């Protein structure tokens, strides 16, 4: 895909080619090809039903797909979710999946256990592993480590989910609307967090909050009715008339909006 090498030395991390997902004859994702580079925060946007979640489902072993998708050359299609996690590809969902009655630390420990091949001693008997300490610091929850996850603020729960991916050693993270329901401060903290962890990983965020996209996207991919509409920098995507049409309606609506100074 031309123009995507914002950083000349960025390496391709996830490569999706001609990916198609059909449900009983309905094509939810149609012939989509995307390159995702290491060290970039990618955003996947598009109106409701565009196929964003289904695309991520296909890349994380939840729905079957045709075409090809690799991470660092490892085939992702046709693999079970646990194998995909072990390969270094993780995701969050729109609704939090933390165990409310367990502490922040225990949630991280369990998530880390999913990644470890061998069965290990429970946390209480072996102390807190270094990588869990690091994750706690990174997500800013060190001070609430022993609190039950159920009492965390909404934003903190989302950060815990991201921490769970960190302890799984996910090098590729798909995040489904991580800032939905967050206040402005929480959104900013989340954006900074994504930048920090994205420097050495590949982050792909499904998002509807365009302010958040504008502030933190290195690269934006736009989907519409299952197809890839366009991809580029925020500026490129915003200037694309097809994107404006998809979000605003018809070409006539776009012209009217432009006349009224809406962009
Ligand atoms: N399991 C399924 N069976 C049948 N159709 C499905 C299934 N999952 C998704 N779809 C359909 O596929 C299309 C794409 O849905 P998807 O959830 O991927 O869109 P999205 O871009 O993530 O939308 P949103 O922003 O609303 O979450 C929708 O028309 C949806 O109804």
Image (tube, rainbow, N blue to C red):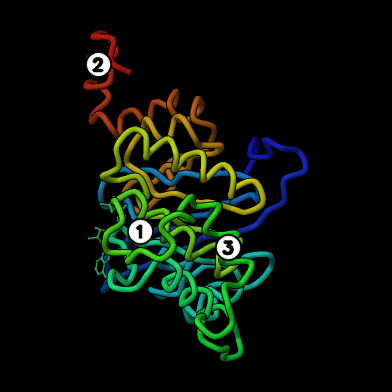
Q: Are marks 3 and 1 in contact (CB under 8 Å)?
A: no
| Above or below for 116 versus 32 | below
User: On the rendered structure, is 251 left or right of 52?
Assistant: left
Q: Indicate the position of residue 122 as horizontal and vertical percent values.
A: 51, 86
Work out whether residue 69 can be spotted.
Answer: no
Instruction: Name the foreground residue: 16 vs 219.
Output: 219
Q: Are marks 1 and 2 in contact (CB under 8 Å)?
A: no
Looking at the image, in which quadrant does ligand 1 appear? Answer: bottom left
Mark 1 Cβ and ligand 1 under 8 Å apart: yes
Disc number at residue 133? 3
Residue for badge 2: 257
Q: Indicate the position of residue 137 as horizontal and vertical percent values.
A: 55, 53
Residue under the point 44% across and 49% down: 205
Q: Earlier in the sequence, mark 2 or mark 3?
A: 3
**Front disc: 2 or 3:** 3
Disc number at residue 53? 1
Occupied quadrant, residue 119 = bottom right
Q: Residue furthest right?
A: 9
Work out whether residue 171 can be spotted.
Answer: yes
């Amino acid at each position: 895909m031309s123009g995507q090498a914002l950083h000349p030395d960025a390496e391709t991390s996830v490569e999706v080619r001609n990916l198609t997902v059909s449900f009983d004859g309905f094509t939810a994702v149609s012939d989509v090809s995307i390159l995702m580079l290491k060290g970039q925060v990618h955003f996947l946007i598009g109106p409701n039903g565009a196929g964003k979640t289904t695309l991520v489902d296909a890349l994380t072993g939840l729905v079957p797909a045709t075409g090809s998708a690799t991470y660092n050359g490892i085939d992702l299609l046709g693999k079970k979710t646990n194998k995909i996690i072990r390969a270094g590809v993780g995701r969050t969902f729109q609704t939090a999946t933390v165990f409310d009655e367990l502490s922040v630390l225990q949630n991280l420990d369990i998530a880390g256990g999913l990644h470890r091949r061998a069965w290990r001693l429970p946390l209480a008997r072996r102390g807190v592993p270094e990588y869990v300490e690091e994750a706690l610091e990174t997500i800013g929850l060190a001070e609430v480590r022993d609190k039950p996850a159920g009492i965390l603020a909404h934003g903190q729960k989302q950060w815990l989910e991201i921490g769970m991916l960190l302890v799984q050693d996910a090098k590729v993270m798909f995040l489904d609307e991580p800032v939905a329901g967050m206040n402005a401060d929480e959104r900013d903290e989340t954006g900074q967090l994504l930048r920090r962890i994205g420097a050495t990983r590949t982050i792909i965020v499904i998002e509807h909050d365009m302010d958040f996209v504008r502030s933190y996207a290195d690269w934006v991919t736009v989907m519409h009715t299952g197809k890839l509409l366009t991809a580029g920098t925020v500026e490129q995507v915003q200037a694309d008339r097809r994107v404006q049409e998809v979000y605003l309606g018809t070409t006539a609506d776009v012209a009217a909006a432009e006349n009224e100074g809406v962009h």
